[in-house]
Image (spheres, grey):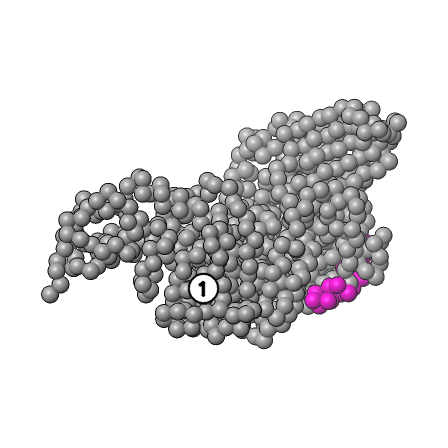
Amino acid sequence: MSEQITFTIDGVEIKDKAGQTIMQAADEAGIYIPRLCRHPDLPPRGSCRVCTVFVNGKPQAACTQPIAEGMTVENDTPELKESRRNIIDMLFIEGNHFCMFCEKSGNCELQALAYRLGILSPKYPYFFPKKDVDSTHPDIFLDLNRCILCGRCVEASRDVDHKGVFEFVGRGIEKKIAVNAEADLKDTDFAATDKAADVCPVGAINKKRTAFSTPIGKRLYDTKPIGSEIEERKK
Amino acid sequence: MSKRVIIEPVTRVEGHGRVSLLLDENNKITQARFHVVEFRGFERFIQGRPYWEMPVIVQRLCGICPVSHHLAAAKAMDQIVGVDKLTPTAEKMRRLMHYGQMFQSHALHFFHLCSPDLLFGFDADPKIRNIIGVAAKYPELAVQGVMMRKYGQEIIKATAGKKIHGTGAIPGGINKNLSITERDVFLKDIKQMFDWSRSALNIAKDYTVKNLEKLKPFASFDSNHLSLVRSDGAMDLYHGNLRAITADGKKIFDQVDYTNYLDYISEEVKSWSYMKFPFIKSLGPQNGWYRVGPLARINTCDFIDTPEAEAARKEFMAVTNGKPNNITMAYHWARMIEILHSIEKINELLNDPDLQGTDLVVKGERRNEGVGLLEAPRGTLFHHYKINDNDQIVMANLIVSTTNNNEPFNRAIQKVVADHIDGVPEITEGLLNHIEVAIRAYDPCLSCATHAMGKMPLKVTLFDYQGNEIASKTKE
């Protein structure tokens, strides 16, 4: 029998088994910790820092940090909300995110988080960077204008599909997703049925000929904010 | 010494335009032009984007009748995905969206933009000659305008998902049907909408008939007319073939498959406007220009397939003894015939069980080119796209309704200037409003036509021949 651990999130006592991350324990308890790069079917990366919480006063990524006996976790605080807003803000201005014609709109985790965090417009000036699109694949449209470098596609293609179609190249502001081919996405063995085609949180990896088929009102985040599916678990 | 008068921007129209008048020393007009000076470049910046984005991205040309662009692009995309015939549910949902759009757009124009001119007169004090003045003196009309617009907008929301910039039409079909609950909401209010449409038609008709002798020459001129008509010659605002007629009703071409529009229509570029000048190729740029929109549609069609609008059409045509009506101010009457036609069509569709069907999308064999035309509130709208083998747009040509009316705007302005302003000692605000009344009759949407946006206060400046400012009048 695993060791039972007791700790608190925002003063609420949580009991869970050892080895769980803060995010897993919070999810089970119906407490939503905002996150972006984390995907339930992939190992946590801790790269986007949206899920940062204070653990005994120190900032930690909730998706990677294991729970420990007696720890005090702060999640829903004005300071953390502001820093999460800043991260989302910066992701918006670093790319070219035109929600008004993006096929992911309504199902986009970045957009949904912005709404949940009350971001009405970015506070920093747009970079308007020049980004590539790759439409060569018969079933996939790759639009790096909308990529937020979460790394989900990299992991899914490498660890689930065992293909390694995507990889990061470059550093800092030059960092981007590249495909594992001399030329284009069509030259890889990527398929629309791959896990990597299903994990993109934004409109960067899109299955062709499926856009806008879900009517407004029926999309994932049309009626309930992101995270409410977790909060509904609360007894 | 010559002077230049600039009216900029023109008010109570959609978008941003400018009128310039060149006068000699005796205030005789030597040149009158309608300029559209903004440029947005949609045709260029959509290149490289995937074709399925088109119905959603190009509708951003406009916030007044985005549905027209949404549907015209969707019709072009139907061809790209190899679909020539939609399912009954998809076609009828799109039609419902379109008639809802026609209803709200015509209501907006009639009640909010043009009614101050008709109710108070062209020369009335500008302090009351506006929608606030209408609301104060004729509150029931202002309310009707708002409620009719709301009804149309709610239909758009029920079919496209949002009142402005929805996503309903997708290549090969539609993404939703109409639930019984949604349908019943509209059926509950439809009688009221019929009554108000009839009443609006009567206002426009009575105004035109009562002032016929004054309106006949006002901003009027003979022109060709162009629109889509159904294969049996009926008015059809969503789909049909191209028909063009002369000012006296002779057919220039008829039942032309619109995918071949380039064989019949060409566009001329002039250095002083970002808005192109379309013309009928066989007649050339000098004589081939034409009018589109409600007046042209009533003139070109053989009949209207809904009873009340057809009766209204017959009355309308009787004024010109069955010949095409070339009176610019008759646009308002024609527009209200269409608003009645639209509500009749909406009623027909709401009572059609096909709207509750579940067969929404058809698939076909992909093609690399698509053309989509429809009759937008302001006239015939052309969308034409070519794509590469990777599904990306490589060419787009949009001839929007207002662009088709470019030469007519210039003619209307020249006529007003010649009749009312030429040689007068002082150019008053009321006289300048005559020019705007003429432009407003066409309900131009300069946002669409030039891909520009903006509010429209009026500024008039007089310059001497050396370009020195002599006087300036501004209207907010």
The image quarter containing residue B439 is top right
- The residue carrying pointer 1 sits among few (fewer than 14), some (14 to 19) or many (20 or more) residues within 10 Å by Cα, namely some
Residue shown at the point (77%, 36%) measured from the top left: B20
Residue shown at the point (37%, 53%) measured from the top left: A48
Q: Position of residue A223 (x, y in %)?
A: 37, 53
Q: Where is residue B379 in the image (x, y as percent from the top left)?
A: 68, 53
Q: Mark 1 points at which residue?
A: A167
Q: Position of residue B402 (x, y in %)?
A: 69, 49
Q: Where is residue B266 in the image (x, y as percent from the top left)?
A: 78, 58
Q: Bounds of the magenta span?
A: B244-263
Residue shown at the point (73%, 40%) measured from the top left: B438
Please give left or right for residue B190 compared with residue B434 in the image: left
Three-letter amino acid code of the residue under disc 1: Glu
**Chain letter, disc 1 residue:** A
Residue B248 belongs to the span the image colors magenta: yes
Please give left or right for residue A122 compared with residue A54 in the image: right
Instruction: Identify which residue, B273 or B138, lies in the foreground.
Output: B273
Residue B220, visible in the rendered structure: no
Residue A134 belongs to the span the image colors magenta: no
Residue A156, visible in the rendered structure: yes
User: Farthest residue in the front direction?
Assistant: A171
